Image: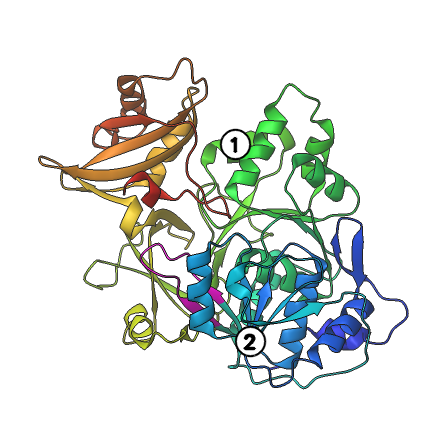
Amino acid sequence: MTSLLPALDETSGRADSPEAVRFGPHALDYAGLAGASAALAARLAGAGRVAVWATPTAATVVAVVAALRAGVPAVPLNPRTGGRELAHILADSTPSLVLAGAGDELPDALDGLERLDVDPDARAPGTFPEPPAESPALIVYTSGTTGPPKGAVLPRRALAASLDALEDAWAWTADDVLVHALPLFHVHGLVLGVLGPLRRGGSVRHLGRFSPEGVARELLSGGTMLFGVPTMYHRLAGALDGAEDSGELRKALAGARLLVSGSAALPLHDHERITAATGRRVVERYGMTETLMNTGVRADAAPRAGTVGPPLAGVELRLVEEDGTVLEDPASLGEIQVRGPNLFTGYLNRPDATAAAFTEDGFFRTGDMATADPDGYVRIVGRRATDLIKSGGYKIGAGEIENALLEHPGVREVAVTGEPDPDLGERIVAWVVPSDAGSPPGARELADHVAELLAPHKRPRVVRLLDALPRNDLGKIMKRSLGV
């Protein structure tokens, strides 16, 4: 495999080079990033695994890049992780030291680990041999919704394959300037949002904290691409709809080359609001920690709201029945299974979980339910465990009911789940954040609304009102917190 980050070697030692990363007023060009990461990489030789205190700063980028150049697996740590979960991750991954910014205050769980402060201003010459393609690059811990988090071991081969497939799908070049505010402890923000631009020789501007004003500012000052999660695009749609002057934001989004949403499905209502205001459509893609990117709407194709596009180059995708039978009719609802160079090598210290995750012919069982259009565009319904509802003999996807409810003017946010019912097997429950808390829509009104748009058997039988939906750091709704 060629170098994972070729632009660093090409610009090492140059006095003048393009900007690589920027966090607010703090920027590093490629020569600076090459020098800072080389200085740190020289100190990591033989370190085994290293933990990275993954704040949204240049220090995190230097730390991860240095580990990659040294051939040392990096374990990104979420700074908001609780003590018990953090202790589990450290005990499972056994890093030899933790890399952190000089000003970072680390929690007690890290007290027994040697600390190495990262200096983005350090400079040293140096080139490093490219490690084998199958060697671990990152160990990223899953959310742990069904038990303690598992460490997904991502080889260099998987990172390169996914980023190159996205280069092909999105015509991603060194001229692109990516804008985002995603966390750097997850594959969306770190692999796609940082290593993606660095592999291309382009640049990334991280907002630190998301805001519509920050998005507008960076896109209007040279940004060409925006990566976000549905919560962010929901806020952008709200700002476009708002009474305040949104002319700058409208101009910024309309002028971007590519608007990409990921990590969860973007509701159709928000797709339509953004398109109506800007004339631009948001494209979606589909990936997981264990698989990196599987599908994506191409930049040269017409976006299709509600789909995550066809499989990316090199990815095999199939839909299967509960018993593993491959569906011949892609319009039928089935579980997504994928195979390709984008897959992880396994869960750290969990051979049992790794074996259970793969089929005998090497496909990864995603647990995500979907249908496919005749041309291969995938429509994800949701997770098998939380979004597939079996009611009255029907298999019903929560996502289409959520999209229907969001078309009701009285619904600001919604999550749909199933709960046991002695007659139906499961009944459909809608958890609704009303647009006006003082005058929420009634359960019968919402049920009739869904029945008219979809079908009577898809109407919610129960409506529960909430002030807010529980979400994780990426904005995903945590349905298990709703009692699922």
Can residue 345 be seen from the camera position used here?
Answer: yes
Residue located 45% across and 66% down the image:
89
Residue located 22% across and 28% down the image:
461
Q: Residue furthest left?
A: 423
Residue 238 position (above or below residue 225): above
Residue 441 position (above or below residue 133): above
Upstream in sequence: badge 1 or badge 2: 2
Nearest to the eye among marks 1 and 2: give it: 2
Q: Mark 2 points at which residue?
A: 73
Q: Which residue lies furthest to the top in this view?
A: 439
Residue 111 position (above or below residue 57): below
Magenta-span inclusion, residue 32? no
Residue in front for this viewpoint, 406 or 436: 436
The magenta stretch spans which residues? Answer: 140-153
Residue 112 position (above or below residue 19): below
* Mark carried by residue 446: none
> Residue 183 at what x, y percent from top left?
58, 53
